[in-house]
Image: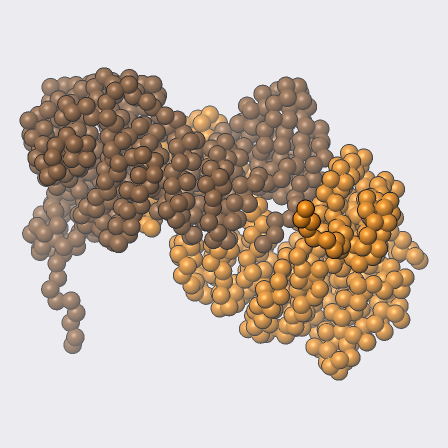
Chain colours: A orange, B brown
Amino acid sequence: MLIMPKAISFTKEMTGKLFPIETGKLISILNEVDAKEFGLFPGDRLEITNSRNGKKCITFLDVSKDALLNDEVGLFQEVADRLGHKPKDVLMVRAVEPIESVEFVKKKMRNEKLSQDEIKQIVKDIADDKFSDLEATAFMSAVYMRGLDLDETIYMTKALIENGNKIEFKKGIVVDKHSVGGCNGRATMITVPIVAAANAGLIVPKTSSRSITSAAGTADSMEVLAPVSFSIKEVQEMTEKVGAVIVWGGAVDLAPADDKIIKIEHPLSLDPEGQVIASVLAKKSSVGSKFVVIDLPVGKFVKIKDKETALRMAKKFVEVGKQIGMDVDAVITDGEEPSGLAFGPALEAKFALEILEGKRFDNLAQKSCELAGIIFEMTGTTKEGKGYDLAVDILTSGKALLKMKEIIKIQGGKIDSSLKVPLSEMVFQINSDSTGVIDDIDTRKITKIARLAGAPADKKAGVLLLKRKGEKVSVGENLFTIYAENQQKLESAQEYAIKEKPYSFKRVILETIR
Amino acid sequence: MLIMPKAISFTKEMTGKLFPIETGKLISILNEVDAKEFGLFPGDRLEITNSRNGKKCITFLDVSKDALLNDEVGLFQEVADRLGHKPKDVLMVRAVEPIESVEFVKKKMRNEKLSQDEIKQIVKDIADDKFSDLEATAFMSAVYMRGLDLDETIYMTKALIENGNKIEFKKGIVVDKHSVGGCNGRATMITVPIVAAANAGLIVPKTSSRSITSAAGTADSMEVLAPVSFSIKEVQEMTEKVGAVIVWGGAVDLAPADDKIIKIEHPLSLDPEGQVIASVLAKKSSVGSKFVVIDLPVGKFVKIKDKETALRMAKKFVEVGKQIGMDVDAVITDGEEPSGLAFGPALEAKFALEILEGKRFDNLAQKSCELAGIIFEMTGTTKEGKGYDLAVDILTSGKALLKMKEIIKIQGGKIDSSLKVPLSEMVFQINSDSTGVIDDIDTRKITKIARLAGAPADKKAGVLLLKRKGEKVSVGENLFTIYAENQQKLESAQEYAIKEKPYSFKRVILETIR
C-alpha cells in the first residue's frame, strides 16, 4: 500500500545532549513535543548537521518522554562521533524521507523480483548504516518469506563482494571449504592442513566463524591453540609464508555488509537459503578462492533436514559460483550422527589434533580426508578418484600435523612437542538409566548442555560423547561427560541433561494395546 | 529452519548503571565481554532480578563497546522503574530463551495458519512488552506478506478486544462510523452530531486518531474546537450526558495492544488488510458499538486503489463484525476527489462547522448525510431508503449544530455564538500557469504541501483548495492557498508546490508524431 510523504523539511536549531552508549547504531532522541513538531515517529529519519564543522549524520529517531528538554536532541555515541560533537555546538536538525531502497524492500515484500541495481543499492545502504534495524529486519523477513531466485542470489553475491574487501595473493591457487549448518567436529582443522601440506601450490586462507548457537565455531576451537584475530594484511602475509591460516572472519572485516546482515538475522534465527549461499560465496570470493568445496550435512538435528533441500542448495551453490568465476563442488554428507565426539572449543580442538597426530581415525577424519580429496581432484592435483587416497597419505604421514604446527606457530600459538590441550577437571558423568542399543543422539540437546556448561565463552567447557549411535550400553554405563569451568554452570548443564535425556534407545514394541 | 537453543541459564550478580532515557522499550546493555560470557547477541533476552526487592524484568539486550564496565548492566529508565532500581542494588542477571510466541511468528512466516490460541498469545505478549521491536516487525512483515485469512482476522479482532479496555454504557444503543484511509474532510464532525441529534436513543462515543501521514486527523481538527484527551471514565460520563463525544483515541487507552502494533507498522508503512480490519473493529467493540458503518473510499490517491480490494475488505468487515456480535455495513465511496476543500486541522474544522451552520452543502456534507442515513436505517430509526432524508433534515434544521455545540461544551471548548475558527494570516497563493479544465488533483501532493507548511502540529497550517476537478481556470487564477504559522515552513511548502504542481489539466492530444 501507499507510503505517504512524511518529510517536513524545515530546519530547527537544537543543542545536543550526549548519551555515551555505543551500540553500533545511529540513534538520536527527541522529546515528544519536538518529535510532533517535526511530524516524526520512532524509527523515522532525522538529519543532523553540526553548524560548526559542517559534519552531517542521518540518524534514526527514538522518542523519549523525559530525557530531553525542548530544542535538545539526544545523541548516542556513534552519532556524536560522526558529528564531531562538542557541548556548545549548534545542530541544524531536519526530518528527511526514507531512502529509496526501503521502497525496494516493500517491492520484495509484495513478491516482486528485485533487479541487480536494486539489490546492489540495498546492500550498499545496509553497509553504510543507512537502514534502521527495523527496516533491515523487514528486508530479511521478506527474503526469508519470498526467497531469492537464482538471479537474485547471484545479484546478492555480487553486491556483497562489491561492498566487501579483498585479499589478492601474489602466488598460489586459493582453495577453500565451507560446511553449512553442521553442529560440531572441526573438519576444517584437519582438511586445511592436509590440503596445504600437499605441496601442490594450493593455499588456504581460511576464515571461520565463532559459534552463534553451537557449542563452538572453528574460530573458537582454533583460538585454544593460537590467536585468531588478524587484519587482512596479516592474513595475506601469514598465508603466503606457510600456505594456510585458520582465523576468525569477524576480525578480518572482509565482508562488513554481510556481517551486518547476519547480525540482523540472529534474533529470529532467519537464514534464508539464498542469503546463506550469497554470504558464503561472497566471503570465499573476497579471499580470491578459485576452487571451493561446500559440505551440506543432512539430518534431523542439523540445519538441512532433507536431501531435496540439500540438492537444491547444492545446485545453486555450483551455479552462483560459475557466475562469479569460481569452481564449486557441493557435497551432501551424512548429518544424522555428530561428526565428532567432542562439543566445545577445547574438546573439539583436542580431538582434531589427535586425528592429525594419528592417534585416532574416526568419522571426522574420514570426512576431512574426503573433503580434502575433492579439492585435490578439482584442482587437478590428483586424477579423478585419487584425491581421498592422497589426503589419507598426507594425514597418516604426519605432514598434515607438521603443517598444522606451522599454522599455529605463524598465528602466534605455542608449539609444545605434544600439542597437549588441557581439559577442565570439573566434570560430571551422565550414565545410562537403561540397557539397550543407542538409537539416536539429539545433538541439539547435547549442544545445549555444552552451552549451559559454559561453551563457547568458557573454552574448556563442553560435552564429550562416550557412546555412539548403534552401540550397546548397560544401565549405569557412562554415556557422556560434561566439562565446565564454573560450578553453577556445571549444575545447570547437569540438571538439563538429566531431565532432557539426549540419548534414546531402540524399541521394538512401538505400542501396546490392552 | 531450526531455532537452536540459546539460553545459558547461569546467573550473574551485577550492578546497574542507569541511562535515564524513556523510549517505551525494555532495553538493557552489557559490554562485549559480559555479552559473550552469557552467549548473547543484541536483541536476545536478559532477565534481571533486583535482589533487594525481588522485582523482575525481562529486557532486550544491546551490546556496547565502551559504556559499561565488566559486571555492570545498563538499564534504560523503564527497566530501572520496573526493578525499583537504586544505585547500590545487587542485580541477578541471566539469559532467558525467546518466548514461545516468537515461534508462532516463524510459523506465520512459513505461511502456516495460526490458531486462535497462537494469535491470542502473540497479542498478549505484544501488549505485555514481551516482544522486541525486531520480533514485532517480523510479525507485522509476516502478516503483511502472508495475510490473515478470515478466521485469523476474527482471532486477531477477538485477541485485541481481550487485551483492551471496555466502556459499558448504562443506556442507549452505541453506533459508530469509521473511514479507512481517506485523506481529508472530517465527515465524522458532521455525521456524529447528526446521529446524536436524532433523539432515537443512539449514542456515539467516537474515538478518533491523530494524523500520522495526513494533514490532519479528526482528533487534530476537533482539538481546534475543544480538548480531546480524556480518560475512559470521562468519555463514558460525557457521552451519557450529551449523547456523543469526539475524542482522541490515543488518550483513552482502549486498545493498548493495538496501539503498540500500529507503532510498529509505522516505519515501513505496513498496514496489512486483516490487521486494519481487526484494529478498527476491536476499537469499535471496546466502546460497545452495536451498529457500525465503515466507509471505504476508492481512488488513485487514497489507500484503497481499486474496487475489488474495497469489496473484499467490505465483506470481511461485515463477516468479522458478525462474529463479534456487531452489525456492520460497509460502503464503498468515491475517493477520486478529496472529500473536502480543506487540508489541515483548523481549516478542516472550519469547513465542517460551516456545513453544520448551513453555510455550505458540498461533497463532504453529502457524504456525511449518507453515512448518517445508513446508521438510521441499520438501527431501524427510519425505514430503508429514508435514512438520508432524515439526516439532511437534522442537518438543515440546525439540530446537528446544536448537538455539536453541546459536544464542544462538554469537552471543555469555548462556545461563541458564531463558532468562528480563526485562520492564519501568513498565506501564499498558488496560481495556475495554464488555461484549461482541471483533470486531477493529486491529494498526496496537497497533503505533503500542508505538512511542509506545518500541519498537523501547527494547527492553523494547511492548504485550502479554491478550484475543483472539472472546473475551468485561466492562467494566473488562484488554484489553492497555503496557510502557515512559520515563515520557513511556508517557504518550503511554497517551493514544493511550485515544483511539484498538484493540479493537472485535461489534454486532448495525447501524443504528437512528427
> Which quarter of the picture shows residue A182?
bottom right
Task: Find residue B144 and report its horizontal and vertical position in percent.
Answer: 41, 49
Does residue A117 lie above or below B449 as drawn? below
Q: Nearer the viewer, residue B374 or B256?
A: B374
Residue pictured at 26% horizontal, 54% vertical = B308
Q: Is residue B264 left or right of residue B85?
A: left
Residue pictured at 53% horizontal, 48% vertical = B106
Residue B484 seen in the current view: no
Does residue B149 lie above or below A276 as drawn? above
| Residue farthest toward the bottom in the current orientation of the protein | A383
Q: Is residue A96 left or right of residue A340?
A: left
| Residue farthest toward the right in the current orientation of the protein | A417
Task: Find residue A336 and report its horizontal and vertical position in percent.
Answer: 71, 60
| Quarter of the image with the N terminus of chain B in it | bottom right
Q: Nearer the viewer, residue A13 or A272?
A: A272
| Quarter of the image with the C terminus of chain B in it | bottom left
Task: Find residue A508 and report its horizontal and vertical position in percent.
Answer: 74, 55
Residue pictured at 75% horizontal, 76% vertical = A376
Q: Nearer the viewer, residue B305 or A401?
A: B305
Q: Is residue B364 left or right of residue B248?
A: left
> Which quarter of the picture shows residue A197?
bottom right
Task: Find residue B184 and report its horizontal and vertical position in percent.
Answer: 22, 40
Q: Is residue A260 left or right of residue B40?
A: left
How many numbered markers are drawn? 0
Q: Nearer the viewer, residue A351 or A291?
A: A351
Residue B11 seen in the current view: yes
Residue pictured at 40% horizontal, 48% vertical = B148
